[in-house]
Amino acid sequence: MRITSLIWRRCVCRTVILAALAGMVGPGLAHDWGPPFLGSQAMAAQPKPQPQIKVTIEGNRRIEVGTILAYMQLPTDRPITAEDLNTAVRRLYGTGLFNDVELIPGENQVVVQVVENPSISVIAFEGNKVLKDDDLEKIIQLRPRLPFTRSAAEADAQAIIETYRRTGRYAAEVEPVIIERSENRVDLVFEIREGKKATVKSVDFVGNERYGDGKLRGVINTRQSGLFSWLLSKDIYDPDKLELDKEELRRFYLQRGYADFTVLSATAELSPDREGFHITFTVDEGEKYTFGLMVVNIQAKGLDPEGFTALLPAKLEGKTYDASKVDDIADQLTDLAGERGFAFVQVQPRANKNTEDRIINITFDVAEGSRIFVERIDIEGNTRTLDRVIRREMELVEGDAFDTRKIRRSRTNIRGLDYFSKVDIETEPGSSSDRAVLKIKVAEKSTGSLTLGVGFSSSVGPVGNIALTERNFLGRGQIVNATVTAAGRTQVYNFNFTEPRFLDRDLLVGGRVFYLHDNRDNTSSFSVNSYGFGPRVGFPLSEDLDILLSHDFVHDDIKVDPTASAAIQADAGSHITSAVDYKLSYDKRNDPVEPTGGFLATFEQSFAGLGGDQRFVKSDGTVKTWVGLFNDKVVASAELDAGALFTFNNKDALITQRYFLGGNTFRGFAVDGLGPRDLTTNDALGGNYYTVGRLQVSFPIGLPEELGVYGGAFLDAGSLWGLDQTSFPGSNITDSADFRASAGALLFVSTPVGPLELTFAYPIAKQSYDKTEFFRLSIGTRF
């Protein structure tokens, strides 16, 4: 940091100490200030009347004489001493209004000559790009029309530098420059050189023997500069991350048995050019421990111990110690006590280390805790999202009993909104010992997205999708979505609005309107113009089970090519569908945003016939489960998806109501690429029934984590079949539940414009008439 100033005039206080020296002052003043210098006879002499001392102000231009005298505060009820005048001079300098003050004594008078500081006419900033002028004006203390002082300008320059440091720009320089104007005025210009953001040049570890530097760099949040780190902006130095990194290292080692692990120090050394830091973590790994015996010690009166011991997994004995498993067991014990009506129970794991055998025995003390109630809930960091949007996700309100289970679930609920990059709930002492304050700290993230989908099909050519979505409209938690899809000659315009908490209750209210022009000349020799609308309402049936009710009104105008299959020509014309739908969702995922465990099951049905000319029942079900492996570095998922369409009055379902598979729904096959087909016209006819199983795994591929590149593999298998009628004049329709399967590789890349996914697929079981697709790409960008 360097502050370069102009050549400032040194302000020298030329106060003349008035005393009886060389006859410089009259006898009255000499008598007042001279006792230490006069003889004993003078001291014994009879005091004489003191002459009146006259104070004259000279040199002032803007400041009134009376104002200057008021600042000086000279005594009026006793003789003026040299100390009084020295103090008055200091007071004048302390006002910041004067550049120089000189006292000139005379016969029974003192002349005060002042040089006023110039007033600031204009304050300007030059060279700033990262911080705007409005931001800098809020930082400095000087303002136009105030007096200019060197110290104030230097203080403001330092404040600007500190602000740049908080943005990571440690090489920033600020030089205050003045431009003199007439009438003792100046313009003040802060010349700024912002410099580059200070990146992390290196991250090193000292004392680590079990795990190498590369492994530990992947554990912490701080990243060192790499080939593509400028794209991801993850290598910017942030001192607040160091404490978090220390905790991440501790958690990493405690999950692997190193119960004595400590971080001895974490230092960041700024490089000479001030554009980078070299970070060093010094650690002591300690020895590796295994689990010993686990017991539960029930200390809460009236709490039945039955069932608590069953929560202790005996299989852990002898296995590598893992502190996270201890916390999980403690949470389970707390939950069980809460279910039995003991809301204030505290479960405290007590570790007994056997350093000789390197075994840790655990005793879980279950004791009645202090009866604590929630006094207040404070929210910080929500610069955009309204407080009530966050509060309605809390399972506690002011006055409720303090319950760690509900706090934990509340944090999960807030994370599930996917509005924030960070959600923490901290507990602070309240106004009394039985009161606690919950402090919710969040960090906003982008909730608006512009999603671009790009693909290629051998049947329809390029496929594109543009979706504009705002999941937190005006910070109210409302969802607005507008989608435009173009695939060949197909266009879809769809607008959705959802209020997930109508009247701040667990009640979802929303609706959609849409228009579809779907030209399937290349796949099924027909086109359809559809438009419609549908309101919907949803609410929870239990903690994990939700239901969504809706009504869809759709008008279809189907136009069929003369050369189309007879099975499609029968559907030509206008049709109206009025259907009532419901959807059940059972969610047991461990994380609603990035699940690594648990499952999600959905089942939905549509009943058409309440108006319109269509009569059918359509049922769909999906079950998907996730599992994290190797500390969640590898995530595997399995999904089963199935559907069935039943019609009435022996009438075949419209082609627009049947199921079609391919593209994203069955990788390796083109859109509408498999299922029943008229071999005469090569038209895809869709099916009334389908089932698909999907297996997928994602994993790191050895590249630095800051690149955000992961690999994956998948296997899709299933079938599409079922037509109510397969015999038409001049048609050769094949309709069988023949098994299809495909496998391939995935590549996920985090880019500045969003997540990029590349799919390479190869069908391993197909029919000769199926349409395949080898490559598919999708990309999204956030704003």
Image (cartoon, rainbow, N blue to C red):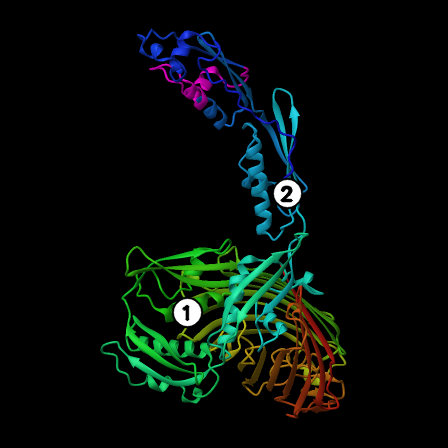
The reply to whether discs 1 and 2 touch (Cβ–Cβ < 8 Å) is: no
Horizontal arrangement in the rendering, residue 153 relative to residue 762 (left or right): left
Label 2 residue SS? loop
Q: In which quarter of the image is residue 239?
A: bottom right
Hey, what amino acid is under mark 1?
Arg
Query: Which amino acid lies under the numbered mark 2 shown in the image of this protein?
Result: Arg
Which residue is at a point 54% across and 69% down the rendered structure image? 283
Residue 613 in the figure: left or right of residue 6: left
Residue 408's label in the rendered image is 1
Who is closer to the viewer here, 270 or 189?
Answer: 270
- Which of label 1 and label 2 is nearer to you? 2
User: What label does residue 2 carry, if any?
Assistant: 2
Density class for disc 1 (Cα within 10 Å; few <14, some 14-19, many ≥20) is some
Residue at (31, 76) in percent of width and height: 366
Q: Which residue is more in the foreground, 39 or 17? A: 39
Question: Residues in magenta?
Answer: 59-87
The correct choice, above or below, for 84 with respect to 471 in the image is: above
Could you tell me if residue 471 is visible in this image? no
Per the model, the C-alpha gap separating discs 1 and 2 is 48 Å
Query: From the viewer's perspective, is 758 left or right of 43?
Result: right
State the quadrant of the N terminus: top right
Per the image, label 1 sits on a secondary structure element best described as helix
Relative image position of residue 599 (x, y in whole percent): 50, 80
